[in-house]
Image (cartoon, grey):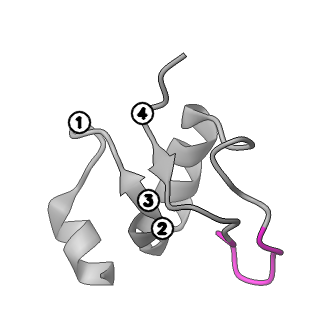
Amino acid sequence: MTRKYILKPGKHQFAPGDTAVHDNESLTDDEARWYLEEYPHIAKLFLHIPDEEYDAELFDEYC
């Protein structure tokens, strides 16, 4: 299975107050899509986001 959403190496915290538990082994594309909708600032934690899901203006706003 090829993943469309690729996180930068390491464990990451998505939601404020949560622990850093997300990595490429534990995150599905569906979960990544949901987290990006809820917490757009986490886009900078990804190395790759599919073009059809990528909102350059939103990404630039948070990076």
Decide: is 4 above or below 42.
Answer: above
Distance between the Cα atoms at labels 2 and 1? 18 Å
Residue under numbered circle 1:
52
Residue under numbered circle 2:
45
Decide: is 54 above or below 15.
Answer: above
Q: What residue is rendered at 48% in x and 56% in y?
A: 36
Q: Amino acid at mark 2?
A: Leu
Residue under numbered circle 3:
46
The tag earlier along the polypeptide, 2 or 1, is 2
Q: Amino acid at mark 4?
A: Lys
Distance between the Cα atoms at labels 4 and 3? 10 Å
The disc at residue 4 is: 4
Decide: is 17 above or below 47.
Answer: below
Residue 45 is a magenta residue: no
Q: Are marks 4 and 3 in contact (CB under 8 Å)?
A: no
Q: What residue is rendered at 35% in x and 49% in y?
A: 48
